[in-house]
Amino acid sequence: MRRPIIAGNWKMNKTPSEAAQLVKDLIPLVKDADIDVVVCPPYTALYTVAELVKGTNIKLGAQNVHFEKSGAFTGEVSIDMLKELGVEYIIIGHSERRQYFNETDETVNKKAKVILENGLTPIICVGESLDQREKGVTNDFVSMQTKLALNGIAGEDVKKVVIAYEPIWAIGTGKTATSKEANDTIEAIRNAVKDVYGEEVSEAMRIQYGGSMNPKNATELMAQKEIDGGLIGGASLKAEDFSKVVLY
Ligand code: PGA
């Protein structure tokens, strides 16, 4: 059985004091959740949130990392910097980073390797555009993104990876994939991993759905066989909404 994982992607929201308030409100609401609960604040709030979640069941995630260890990379943040703060999960390859910040399958792969080598968990985002879905190439496209992200990574490490399937047209739009669409695409991703690594690995790997997931649709999405969790944007910015998704 795969352990469910619900992660909040706060994106570019919340100052350190606002982040502290959000996580203080969240802690009592999710304390009994028997799943992996992760919050991913912006870098500037990581320290504050790290202190507050110590000793709770909430884990800390970051929204990006650079693949080099250190050096002249103005504006970037390294894996050691995140590790020292207690970060355990790192989102990479989010469609917003692919679209606005030149994230490519190649950099996603480099980042995934660095994260795994350091014993942390990458949350690797994949997902098709509306045009791709309408043209019927969704499964091929997300399977290719997944294989390229995992290229050169050993099966034992692939088991630890979390994939977030996020149809781009469903992110922040209020439009969700139907639970069947989400389940079918996630099944295609799992099959692509099975082709390369075999069933033991593909069955161990967790795959989330993301894209306008909220308290209203979480129960149905989480009831799908292939869906192991959610990556939550908008609904993670309110403690009550996020806790309802966590307690789906
Ligand atoms: P959303 O964002 O829940 O606001 O659609 C999800 C994401 O981008 O991770």
Image (cartoon, rainbow, N blue to C red):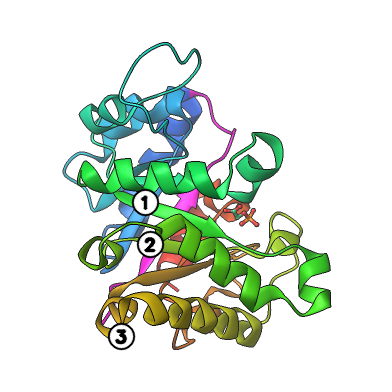
Mark 2 is on which residue type? Val
Q: Residue at x 57, y 60 (%)?
A: 126
Mark 3 C-beta to ligand 1 under 8 Å: no
Asked if the residue at tag 3 contacts the one at tag 1, i.e. Cβ–Cβ closer than 8 Å, the answer is no
Is-magenta flag for residue 220? no
Magenta stretch in the rendered image = 1-15
Residue that carries the numbered disc 3 in the rendered image: 199
The location of residue 242, given as percent across then percent down, is 49, 57
The numbered mark, 2 or 3, whose residue comes first in the sequence reads: 2
Toward the viewer: 105 or 8? 105
Mark 1 is on which residue type? Pro
Asked if the residue at tag 3 contacts the one at tag 2, i.e. Cβ–Cβ closer than 8 Å, the answer is no
- Between the residue at mark 1 and the residue at mark 3, the CA separation in whole angstroms equals 20 Å
Residue with the most extreme left position:
55
Q: Quadrant of the C terminus?
A: bottom left
Secondary structure, mark 2, is: strand
Residue that carries the numbered disc 1 in the rendered image: 122
The numbered mark, 1 or 3, whose residue comes first in the sequence reads: 1
In the picture, the disc for residue 162 is 2
Residue 74 visible: yes
Q: Quadrant of ligand 1?
A: bottom right
Is residue 118 rendered to the left or right of residue 126? left
Give neighbour class at mark 2: few <14, some 14-19, many 20+ (Cα, 10 Å): many
